[in-house]
Amino acid sequence: MTKQEAARNMDDVAGELGSHVRERRRKLGIRQEELADLAGVSPRFVHSLEHGKPTMRLDKVLAVLDVLGLELEVGVRQ
């Protein structure tokens, strides 16, 4: 895999993660600001996460996922 392919793949993963976060937050009926407060992160962080920013601090991502009742799962590529 080339560096360009890896970067594109990371963008895809970040976008998919952001979509799941946004969908779950909306389903729970909470605003970005409320989620940020509950997770101990900034509203800007939540916004960036939901919009697929590929470089995010893992500890903060996990805090947001925890509040939403989501988990991050890793698997072997096919």
Image: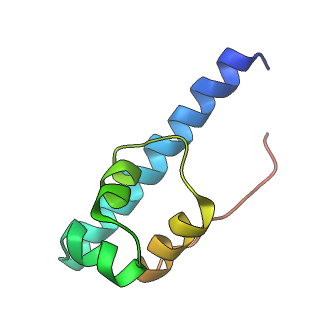
The number of discs equals 0
Q: Position of residue 30 (x, y in %)?
A: 20, 76
Residue at (38%, 58%) from the top-left corner?
45
The picture places residue 42, in percent across and down from the top left corner, at 34, 66
Quadrant assignment for the C terminus = top right
Q: Is residue 25 left or right of residue 29?
A: right
Q: Where is residue 37 in the image (x, y as percent from the top left)?
A: 31, 79
Q: Which colour scheme is used?
A: rainbow
Which residue occupies the foreground of this view, 74 or 56? 56
User: For residue 46, what is the image quadrant?
Assistant: bottom left
Residue occupying image coordinates x 76% and y 55%: 75
Q: Residue sitting at 45 percent across and 72 percent down?
A: 64
Percent coordinates x, y for residue 26 in the rendering: 22, 68
Residue 4 higher or lower than 15, as above or below = above
The N terminus - image quarter:
top right
Most foreground residue, 28 or 64: 64
In this rendering, position of residue 33 left or right of residue 78? left
Locate residue 57 relative to residue 73 in the image: left or right. Answer: left
Q: Is residue 1 above or below residue 49?
A: above
Q: Residue at x 73, y 59 (%)?
A: 74
Name above or below for residue 8 compared with residue 43: above
Q: Quadrant of residue 31?
A: bottom left
